[in-house]
Amino acid sequence: MNIEFENAALEELYTKGTTQDHRYKRLQPQIIKQYVKVVNYIKAVGRLEDLYRIKSLHYEKKKGDLNGVDAVWINDQYRLFFYSSPDETGIIVNALLFEISKHYE
């Protein structure tokens, strides 16, 4: 799957393991490590539907206020939100990562 980052902070976390962005710089090292692992899982799948097979991700399409947003678990507290879009054949193979969110906050 093709991965893009909506903001530089998420890309820095993925490539460098740290960022100066106030939203993410206090994340614990094990959360960052798991985030990198989750992004690698997303990169490795051929299409969006393949994420359902990786049970630990708990992939879901959000509803309500977050309609149109996809989410996977980083751990039991943190979620990675992204937008997905199809290629020219209609198969969903693009993901735009936009936020790490603490669940229920």
Image (cartoon, rainbow, N blue to C red):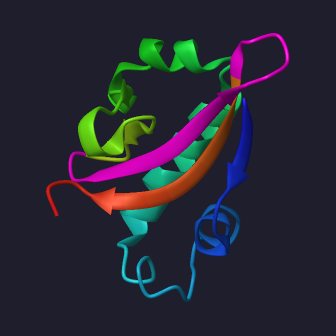
Which x, y percent locates residue 100?
Answer: 41, 59
Look at the image and tell me in which quarter the N terminus lies.
top right
Q: Residue furthest left?
A: 104
Residue 65 at what x, y percent from top left? 28, 45
In screen coordinates, is 14 left or right of 63?
A: right
Is residue 3 placed above or below 48 in the rendered structure? below
Does the magenta run of residues contain 83?
yes
Residue displayed at 44% across by 88% down = 22
Task: Tell me what residue is drawn at x 17 percent, y 64 percent.
Answer: 105
Query: Percent x, y for residue 17?
Result: 59, 70
Who is closer to the viewer here, 26 or 6? 6
Residue 52 vertical position relative to residue 33 in the rendered view, above or below: above
In this view, 23 is above or below 97: below
Residue at x 54%, y 13% (from the top left corner)? 49
Question: Does residue 54 appear to the left or right of 103 in the view shown?
Answer: right
Q: Residue drawn 56% across and 41% down?
A: 83
Q: Quadrant of residue 98?
A: bottom right
The magenta region covers: 76-92
User: At which x and y percent is residue 86?
Assistant: 71, 23
